[in-house]
Amino acid sequence: MSSSLEFIGTSRSFGEATVLHEVSLIVEPSRCVALLGGSGSGKSTLLRIAAGLDDPSSGQVLVDGGDLDGVPSEKRGIALVFQKPLIFPHLNVVDNVAFSARMAGQSRQAARRHAMAYLELVHLADFAGRSAGRLSGGQEQRVALARALARNPRILLLDEPFSSLDSRLRENMYSLVEDIRSELAPTIVLVTHDRREASILADSIAVLDDGRILQHGPVAQLHYQPATLAVNRILGGLNAISGQVDGGIHHSVLGRVRVQPGMVDGPAFLVMRQEAVRILPAGEGTAVGNVAGLKSLGAHTLVRTEVAGNDGLPETLTVEVSGDPGVSVGQMIGLQPVNGSGWAVIR
């Protein structure tokens, strides 16, 4: 059930508007890659091209090294689950899942027997005889997943399938995807605009913006070693501190912070995740900040500080702490990188 998927210089234009700009991406067998980006970044277009629902204007799409050009969608061995489950309303649960087997010529009994294995996998075996109209949103999405998996696809494409569910149901679906990966080891490409969802479900994240992949890499790499300020922003990073790199040391209002080897000397931004900065008593740490605002995130709090620069202009630095930060607006505090090092980007 696991195959590789590769996009080579894939572009898509609609008239004069180019939606994808020479996208190249490799998804290894049994891996899950999340396509993360805002609306209009080209995520769903790339998925539709893989599924055969749209054609690229240029470039190639390969599965296990074979070019899919001219291969109809139903013969690609690729299943696509949409945001809306698209359950057949006139069929009950088991017959929804058995649909592809019936279309392939299997008897009703054989198709239903095949479908039941996948209903067991998504924990809906007890709902096999229930009509589609009596399902909750989460149950409908489970049926859609089971129906896609019952096709025994080489690759499973998920186009924001959990975005319409409430937070509790989304967590349940995340656990279900983990179960499916453990049981079947499918190759998965997930489209999402939710960075938390991408981080939970995917082995790696490809960040798209304006039809281009800005960076593709492991989840931790994109959080702590973003290639650009845009990647840092899309992954939820709140800090980009201007300064100067000299001999592998970034000089800024946060003090002297060692950055990655090979970083060229010159102006650069220090990208420091909000959870990678520690609050200390005033007089300690590498910098002194004035608490300018507090924002509760429930179990965590964002502490927005202003750190005075050499030119007198303040630089904003945000720190995320667990629980009560124990500080108040107007208080002076010390600040220090947790690991004593950071990551620098030019733009």
Image: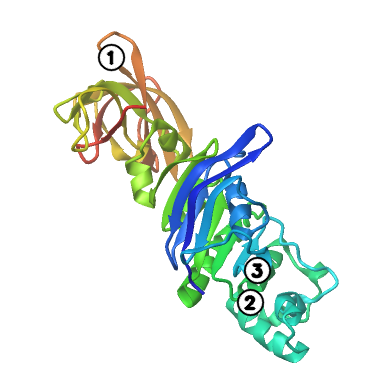
Closest to the observer, 321 or 25:
25
Kindly identify which residue carries mark 1. 309
Q: Residue at x 71, y 76 (%)?
A: 100
Q: Residues within 10 Å of mark 3 (few under 14, many from 20)?
A: many
Q: Is residue 142 above or below residue 20?
A: below
Q: Amino acid at mark 3?
A: Arg
Q: Residues within 10 Å of mark 1 (few under 14, many from 20)?
A: few
Which label sits in the foreground, 3 or 2?
Answer: 2
* Figure quadrant of residue 330: top left
How far apart are the alpha carbons under marks 3 and 2? 12 Å
Closest to the observer, 304 or 271:
271
In the image, residue 98 lies at what x, y percent?
72, 79
Which label sits in the foreground, 2 or 1?
Answer: 2
Q: Is residue 44 above or below residue 143?
A: above
As helix, strand or loop, the secondary structure at mark 2 comes to loop
How far apart are the alpha carbons under marks 2 and 1? 60 Å
**Left or right: residue 130 compared with residue 2:** right
Q: Residues within 10 Å of mark 2 (few under 14, many from 20)?
A: many
In the image, residue 283 lies at what x, y percent?
19, 24
Kindly identify which residue carries mark 2. 150
Residue 299 visible, this angle = yes
Kindly identify which residue carries mark 3. 142
In the image, residue 314 lies at what x, y percent?
34, 15
As helix, strand or loop, the secondary structure at mark 1 comes to loop
Q: Amino acid at mark 2?
A: Ala
